[in-house]
Image: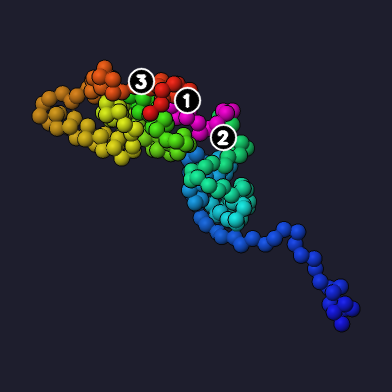
Amino acid sequence: MYEAEERPLMQPLPAERYEMCEWRSAKVAPDYHVTVDYMHYSVPFRLIGEQVDVRLTDSVVAVMSGGEAVAEHRRLRGRKGQYSTVVEHMPPAHAAMDSPRSPERFSSWAHRIGAETGGAVDRLLASRPIVEQAFEPARNILGLSKAYSPELLERACARSNALGAAPSYTVLKNAILAIRAADAEARASGRPPAASDGGLADRAKSAGRLRGADAYRRGGGAQC
């Protein structure tokens, strides 16, 4: 019975084993990546700011938008904060660069704001055993120049640099708020607000507690 009637109707097993899947929702970040389990996967840059669906298996991360597959990556494992980036997903300006998320890019961005901000971000980049771990904190810190002003971020970084420690977003934001409050109080009392906090950093440099920004660049010699 089996050989004669049932066996001819049986289908072969799939060539690949079945994998359980999980669906999640994610928002595409300004750097055109979605974050899943602390790992970052690129999608086409036109989707920045949009909500997408993410299909997870043990081996693959697939991203869907409007029911259409827009990206597929091998699922990252190991240390948190890794990136899987497809060149075709990048904006044209980024695709022309060796790496759109590189320490040089963040350092250049910071130094365009000012020397104190540049020194603070260089110190942050040098403080992490894996430099990619500093990229998101650096982006958040540099965003303070838009949320408040480049001048206030410079003054806050001058205070941080004088202490010689790697900066953090929270510390710098609190410093900006304190500086702004002090300036408002000075104006209310008829005193001019302090023009800069750079003198504090200069005194720290002369005392040997603060290295210049070049010491923290890749291949720049001394490390923390």
Q: Taking 201 as reference, is 35 left or right?
A: right
- Where's residue 160, x and y in %? 28, 30
- Above or below: residue 170 compared with residue 103: below
* Label 1: which secondary element: loop
- Please rate how many residues cluster around mark 2, counting C-alpha atoms within 10 Å: few if below 14, some from 14 to 19, many from 20: some
Q: Check the image and name the residue furthest to the bottom.
A: 1
Q: Amino acid at mark 1?
A: Arg
Q: Is residue 88 visible?
A: yes
In the image, the segment drawn in magenta is 96-109
* Label 3: which secondary element: loop
- Where's residue 214, x and y in %? 41, 20
- Above or below: residue 3 compared with residue 120: below
- Colour scheme of this structure image? rainbow
Q: Which residue is mark 1?
A: 218
- Where's residue 12, x and y in %? 80, 65
**Is there CB contact under 8 Å for labels 3 and 1?**
no
Q: Check the image and name the residue furthest to the top.
A: 206
Nearest to the observer: residue 219 or residue 169: 219
Q: Nearer the viewer, mark 3 or mark 2?
A: 3
**Is there CB contact under 8 Å for labels 3 and 2?**
no
